[in-house]
Amino acid sequence: MCTLIILRQSGADWPVILAANRDEMKDRPWDPPAQHWPDRPGVVAGHDRLAGGSWLGINQDGLAAAVLNRIGTLGPANDKRSRGELVLEALDHATAATAARALEQLNPDAYRPFNLVVADLEEAYWLRLADGRLERREIPEGLSMLTAHDLNDTAKSARTRLNLPLFARTPAPEPASLEWAAWETLLANRLRGDPDEPTSSMTVETESGFCTVSSSLIALPDTRKPELRTTRPIWRFAPGPPDRTAFEDISLD
């Protein structure tokens, strides 16, 4: 179970801001975001050493992609393809629309259930594989939150029910001013949405070894504006639980 927050602001200098915590078994090996795939120049993403895919990445066209497990589907299955492949396949495309159209043609029997997000400066989509059906839905303008449940599902997701209002009333990051602290603090929140459920907090830690292993903040600049044409995206990354690990800017080269 992971968490993704997406803020879409048409007309803003930074029209897409993503915040994400990755929850995984502590002993599953991985590498921080970088250009790990020589056959995919310009793709910067975290690298899952076990299956070779990723959970979150961006490409040189300004497309971001992220995959999350659905509830009760942690880990690989011998008869299924890795869901981490989906992020890399999405980032082979230049736009969210073309990525979403291509990925919704996938064989739903080939993967365990997932939530997949693709977003660029103009559009954003959520692809949901659940109950054997793969569906594509548009992510609206404004603030949205996705966990192992549906988008903005405050009924079933205790994490969303608690934290979506917190993000909504907290000032969003201002990348040009290097102001990230408020959302970094929210990503580090250990307050449980359900007191009896250890995975209902933003930053997770369980006795089984399932925990928040990294945290990310990504901002995509509107390079269609002349004054921002050469501006690069920003990716701030904490290579551990964000309440104990500092965020730093990662290189996109």
Image (spheres, grey):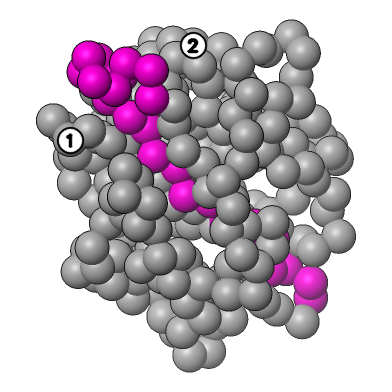
Q: Quadrant of the C terminus?
A: top right
Amino acid residing under circle 1: Ala
Q: Is residue 69 above or below residue 92?
A: below
Q: Residue at x 84, y 39 (%)?
A: 49
Query: How far across and how far down the image is residue 144, in percent?
Result: 28, 51
Labelled disc at residue 12: 1
Q: Residue 56: x and y, percent? A: 57, 38
Which of discs 1 and 2 lies nearer the camera? The answer is 1
- In the visual, does 39 lie left or right of 232? right
In depth, the one of 198 and 156 nearer the eye is 198
Residue interval drawn in magenta: 208-231
Question: Are dots 1 and 2 in contact, CB under 8 Å?
Answer: no
**Which element carries disc 1, helix, strand or loop?**
loop
Q: Which residue position holds label 2?
A: 93
Left or right position of 119 against 114: left
Percent x, y of residue 213:
69, 61
Q: Amino acid at mark 2?
A: His
